[in-house]
Image: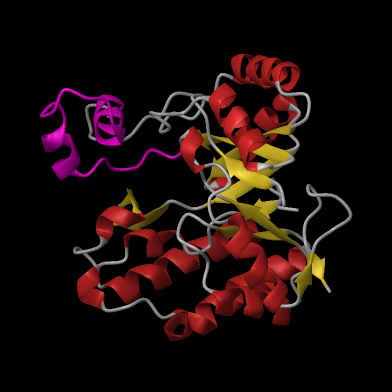
Amino acid sequence: MLPADDHVHSEWSWDAVAGDMDATCARAVELGLTAVSFTEHVDLARWVVPPELLARAGREPRVDIIERMASLADDEGRLVPPPLDVDGYVACVERCRERHPGLRIRAGAEVGEPHLFGEEVRRLVARGGFDVVLGSQHTVPFEGRLWPVDWLFGRVDAHELIRTYLAEVLRLVEGSNDFAVLAHIDYPVRHWPADAGPFDPKVIEDELRTVLRALARSGRALELNTRVPLAAAVVTWWHEEGGRALTFGSDAHAPVAVGRGLAAATAVATAAGFAPGATPVDPWRPA
């Protein structure tokens, strides 16, 4: 049995331009999933919208993430995402629970940079009554402002950038108690430049282990994100550093992507020494 897909987005996430909660649930049922968690984006940081994105806006008659980001930029070129409509989102979750009674649907949030916005995050989590709260890092400081890390490749050496990113992730882990699962520890790898050569996690093993060790000490879970499958070595290091909980997430932003890569991810987790819990929504634990 596949584990829960604990990292899924719908139309309630500002960047999910193709999101559809009801269609995602239908697709999950079709795939044989027994549980999904809709972890909608809560982004409170104001990061730079790169000038090249602003320049590309409006060139093609379609709505995509570039158009969305450009439309949300303020006069200083910073992204100002709309707040999560908690009431509308929770009501949508309840409707989907009624329509798909055989699927366990959990409400949640993916909170960006929670260590920078502790009070706001705590208020939102309390209001939403979320089952799942992910903590994630999407930005790094550059030239005095926060930038989306993926748009700094080409401006900063790739290995230097991922080390800077992991230093920020460490600050997140040590500076916030307001999330239960660390999402996509390898987020920059999604955009790894070809001219940097194949990504090898062993090059940054010390930095990764430092974050994993801090997360293990906190008693929280690591996410095995399948958008770009987390390297098997990192899952093994999580076990070696004392990690006691592992969850899985497709990071789907459209119905077609829900459940993506979960079967392969469970094989990686098993090989690293983790075993499923009593139910699909339980984190995997050391065997």
Decide if residue 143 is in sight here.
no
Query: How many numbered callouts?
Result: 0
Which residue is depicted at the point 62% across and 42% down?
Answer: 31
Give the side of residue 231 with respect to residue 176, left or right: left
Q: Residue furthest right?
A: 278
For the residue pair 217 and 188, the one nearer the viewer reads as 188
Give the quadrant of residue 160. Answer: bottom left
Give the side of residue 152 with respect to residue 15, left or right: left
Whole-percent x, y for residue 224 in the image:
60, 61
Whole-percent x, y for residue 12 in the image:
52, 24
- Let me know if residue 118 is in the magenta part: no
Task: Give the colouring mode of the picture.
Answer: secondary structure
Whole-percent x, y for residue 121 in the image:
63, 36
Which residue is depicted at the point 69% across and 42% down?
Answer: 33
Provide the residue span drawn in magenta: 43-72
Decide if residue 205 is in sight here.
yes
Q: Is residue 85 above or below residue 214?
A: above
Whole-percent x, y for residue 200 in the image:
41, 81
Give the quadrant of residue 234. Answer: bottom right
For the residue pair 81 and 68, the one nearer the viewer reads as 68
For the residue pair 223 and 232, the one nearer the viewer reads as 232
Give the quadrant of residue 159. Answer: bottom left
Which residue is depicted at the point 19% across and 63% down?
Answer: 155
- Let me know if residue 61 is in the magenta part: yes
Give the side of residue 144 with respect to residue 260, left or right: left
Which residue is depicted at the point 34% across and 42% down?
Answer: 47
Q: Please state, as top left, top right, bottom left or bottom right, where the C terminus lies in the image.
A: bottom right
